[in-house]
Image (spheres, grey):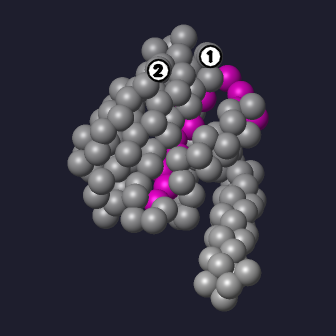
């Protein structure tokens, strides 16, 4: 194996290790997310802003969290990774029955920050172009609930 091939292999391994570490760090914050819900009338809203987590990571985290949510609950996760922003919303069956629509939430968020997205009442995703406006995007998603 040439020196260049060795460096590429080492780089690939380090990148993989970094992704695992980021996922583990995000995973460790799961308990905190569900402790800090906001009563939004129709549902409890759980939000988190994560750094270094891509859309696949958000999906994995949301899978873990949705199973732990009770009653009428909505999860709104926002993250930045590699200069890109992502938003994911998930809702329990009780929340969708109460009229919550994740697609409308993420669409409002994405519009606020120059992105696009949408989805089903129980799950939706969006890409955010202007990550400097992530806080505004989250607030727009919250406002869409009221």
Question: Which quadrant of the figure has residue 73?
Answer: top right
**Rendered position, 48 above or below 105:** below
Q: Is residue 76 visible?
A: yes
- Which of the pair 21/76 is nearer the observer? 21
Closer to the chain start, of discs 2 and 1, is 1
Residue 94 picture location, percent across and down? 61, 16
Which of the numbered marks, if any, corresponds to residue 93?
1
**Which region shows up in magenta?**
68-80
Calculate the distance from the C-alpha at mark 2 to the C-alpha at mark 1: 12 Å
Q: Is residue 23 magenta?
A: no
Q: Is residue 77 magenta?
A: yes
Residue 42 picture location, percent across and down? 50, 22
Residue 123 picture location, percent across and down? 52, 27
At 57% from the left edge and 26% from the top edge, which residue is drawn? Answer: 91
Please state which of the two labelled residues, at mark 2 or mark 1, is closer to the viewer: 2
CB of mark 2 within 8 Å of CB of mark 1? no
Describe the element under mark 2 as helix, strand or loop: loop
Q: Residues within 10 Å of mark 1 (few under 14, many from 20)?
A: some
Residue found farthest to the bottom: 3
At 54% from the left edge and 11% from the top edge, which residue is drawn? Answer: 97
- Which of the pair 136/82 is nearer the observer? 82
**Rendered position, 53 above or below 40:** below
At 48% from the left edge and 50% from the top edge, which residue is drawn? Answer: 78
Q: Is residue 136 visible?
A: no
Describe the element under mark 1 as helix, strand or loop: helix
Can you say which quadrant of the picture contains the N terminus? bottom right
* Residue at which label 2 appears: 120
Residue 23 picture location, percent across and down? 69, 59
């Amino acid at each position: 194996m040439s020196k260049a091939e060795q460096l590429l292999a080492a780089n690939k391994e380090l990148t993989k290790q970094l992704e695992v570490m980021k996922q583990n760090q995000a995973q460790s914050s799961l308990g905190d997310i569900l402790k800090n819900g906001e009563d939004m009338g129709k549902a409890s809203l759980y939000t988190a802003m994560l750094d270094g987590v891509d859309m696949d990571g958000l999906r994995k985290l949301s899978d873990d969290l949705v199973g732990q949510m009770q009653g009428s609950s909505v999860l709104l996760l926002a993250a930045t990774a590699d200069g890109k922003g992502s938003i994911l919303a998930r809702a329990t069956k009780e929340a969708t029955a109460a009229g919550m629509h994740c697609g409308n939430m993420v669409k409002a968020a994405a519009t606020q920050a120059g992105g696009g997205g949408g989805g089903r009442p129980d799950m939706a995703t969006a890409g955010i172009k202007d990550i400097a406006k992530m806080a505004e995007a989250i607030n727009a998603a919250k406002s869409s609930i009221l």
